[in-house]
Image: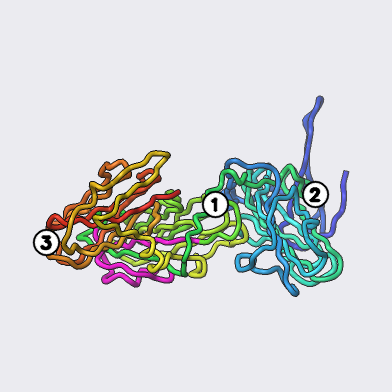
Amino acid sequence: KSGTIGLKAGLHAITVGYFQQAGDNVLSVSYAGPGLSKQVIPNSSLYRVSSSNLLPAVNPSSTVNGLNYSYYEAASYSSVPDFSAATPIKTGTVNTFDISVANRNYSYSINYTGYVNVPADGQYTFYTTSDDGSKLYIDNVLVVNNDAIQAATEKSGTIGLKAGLHAITVGYFQQLGDNVLSVSFAGPGVGKQVIPNSSLYRVSSSNLLPAVNPSSTVNGLNYSYYEAASYSSVPDFSTATPIKTGTVNTFDISVANRNYSYSINYSGYVNVPADGLYTFYTTSDDGSKLYIDNLLVVNNDAIQAATEKSGTIGLKAGLHAITVGYFQQLGDNILSVSYSGPSVVKQFIPSSSLFRTTATSLLNQSVMVNRSSALMFNNDGSNFQMQGLLNNSQIAPGVKVFPNPFRNSIQIDVNGGNSSKIKLSLIDASGKTVWIKNVDYYTTSFHKTVNTSALPIGVYFLKLMQNGNITTTKLLKEY
């Protein structure tokens, strides 16, 4: 049997399905056309996409059927907006690309995020039909650009995918006229069809890390800068003393005093605009490590030429703690930090999404107690009296500890007092010493970063002793 179709010169997708029940086993496929007499299609005319050129599946854990959506309104739209810079009116979940969630039938936009399951390796064509505009991304790659004020219009795009779950994002806007959006796909073993709910997934919100959302933030990051004779990996910053500290707008290595044998630790918060899975990337020469909410997400730690590595984590919308450690031994000085996720195409993390807690708010949270205080704190229902920490007299160095409340680390600044040795102790609410530091050559200024990631939640006291004098600072570790 045969059939005829009009084709432009070039490569066209071909699929042949065949079955054999009994009898002879026979299949041949031929063609004829301009300049081609009828012939079996030769191997030289048949192509497949190399599996190395197919995007790997994401396959997140803890998924359920459906999509997340964010809904927006504005005075008018002429194109699909930048959702990362907009605040939604509402958010929720839907079974499919359902525009009935809109509060009105004009001047609105919706961003859908989730995952689409593709059953086999190969080329997949995605289609959107929309009035007005739409854009479809697969794994943060723009596949369908159907963005215009228009009557219902279908556009498509093709991408090579490995079998499994891939991130899908569809942005849609409606200005005036009909309200129309449909999303379809076709590929190996899949005839063109509206993407069914059974192929759409979202990550269960119960498996996303809650946002931290500290108060009194400003844009930027804190940094601590270190030098050593040599580095072969990102150091343990909790045991090192920085040469200097300060603030930067982003992950800026120009703060280094030299271009060899140094390391920098950046800390602050990153804002993610919607619930979902986020992929973080570092490109570094030499090594880098990236932590989100004290979890190692990207391990790119080696003496190396510029290398990119990535990791993915599920996050609730809002501010999350971010820490990036970097070292440079020799060669090029390179560090860049990027992310992608729901409504965020892969990009350098902008300064507008990075935050630090203001020094004023941190200092206000640090509680200084004197010898006349009788401290009574409740921790899991038990009262602890810490009068033994409070001794006598004389002027001791000033102590500043931040952040407070804290999570994975604290910064200790000691200034003033006498130029003689000091002793610092971190004590839990039961009176147990969990960290201690003797400074034998204190010269009226000392700074230390302490890794507190292993400490349980609760009340702590930082005790500074010099010449029999004690200064105590109350601290709180929170989730």
Scheme by which the image is coloured: rainbow
* In magenta stretch: residue 433: no
| Amino acid at the residue labelled 3 | Ser
* In magenta stretch: residue 264: yes
**Up/down of 84 relative to 303, above or below:** below
Residue 451: x %, y % from top left:
32, 51
Residue 245: x %, y % from top left:
30, 67
> Reading the chain from its start, which is encountered first: label 3 or label 2?
2
**Tag in front: 2 or 1:** 1
Residue pointed to by mark 1: 315
| Amino acid at the residue labelled 2 | Gln
| Amino acid at the residue labelled 1 | Leu
> Reading the chain from its start, which is encountered first: label 2 or label 1?
2
Residue 266: x %, y % from top left:
38, 62
Residue 474: x %, y % from top left:
33, 54
| Magenta-highlighted residues | 241-270
Task: Using the numbered discs, state the Cα–Cα distance from disc 2 to disc 1 in whole angstroms.
Answer: 32 Å
Task: Using the numbered discs, state the Cα–Cα distance from disc 3 to disc 1 in whole angstroms.
Answer: 47 Å
Q: Residues within 10 Å of mark 3 (few under 14, many from 20)?
A: few
Looking at the image, can residue 78 be seen?
no
Residue pointed to by mark 2: 193
Residue pointed to by mark 3: 420
